[in-house]
Image: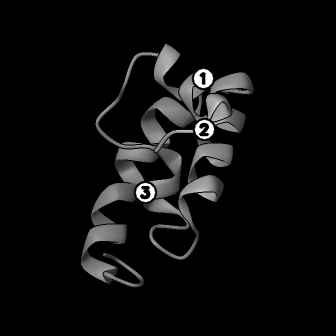
Amino acid sequence: MYQPWHRKRLETVASMVGLWQVTVRSSCDFGGIVELDLHTIEHWPPWLDPKIPAMTPLAVFRGQRAV
């Protein structure tokens, strides 16, 4: 179940890939994922737009800690 602070991440437009998906993957709990999402939403630098999709193939093929 979502906690009240979890809902803040639902107030933004979803993207195909989040920063947590190419960095921590499943190595942290849901609360950690939400914290990373919220930090990313609040401090989004423009250079992350092209960087996250560029990091995705490596994260997928590496497969470390993937669910």
Q: Residues within 10 Å of mark 3 (few under 14, many from 20)?
A: some
Q: Secondary structure at mark 3?
A: helix
Q: In what element is the residue under mark 2?
A: loop
Q: Of the residues shown, which amino acid type is indicated by label 2?
A: Gln
List x then y, in percent, for residue 45. Answer: 67, 27
Q: Residue at x 63, y 54 (%)?
A: 31
Q: Earlier in the sequence, mark 3 or mark 1?
A: 1
Q: Is residue 54 left or right of residue 43?
A: left
Q: Which residue is mark 2?
A: 3
* Residue at mark 1 to residue at mark 2: CA–CA distance: 10 Å
Q: Are marks 3 and 1 in contact (CB under 8 Å)?
A: no
| Secondary structure under the numbered disc 1 in the rendered image | helix
Residue that lies at the very extreme toward the front in this rendered image: 1
First in sequence: mark 2 vs mark 3: 2
Mark 2 or mark 3, whichever is nearer to me? 2
46 left or right of 39 in image:
left
Q: What residue lies at 44% left-to-right and 45% top-to-bottom?
A: 52
**Percent position (x, y) of residue 43?**
74, 27
Real-space Cα separation, disc 3 to disc 1, in angstroms: 18 Å
Which residue is under mark 1? Answer: 8
Report the residue at 53% width, 63% height from top: 23
**What amino acid does circle 1 point to?**
Lys
The x, y position of residue 3, in whole percent, is 60, 38
In the drawing, what numbered circle is on residue 21? 3
- x, y percentage for residue 7? 55, 26
- Please name the amino acid that badge 3 sits on: Gln
- How many tags in the picture? 3
Spatial CA distance of label 2 from label 3 is 21 Å
Task: Give the residue displayed 47% in from the left and 30% down from the top.
Answer: 49
In which quarter of the view is residue 24 placed? bottom right
Q: Nearer the viewer, mark 1 or mark 2?
A: 2
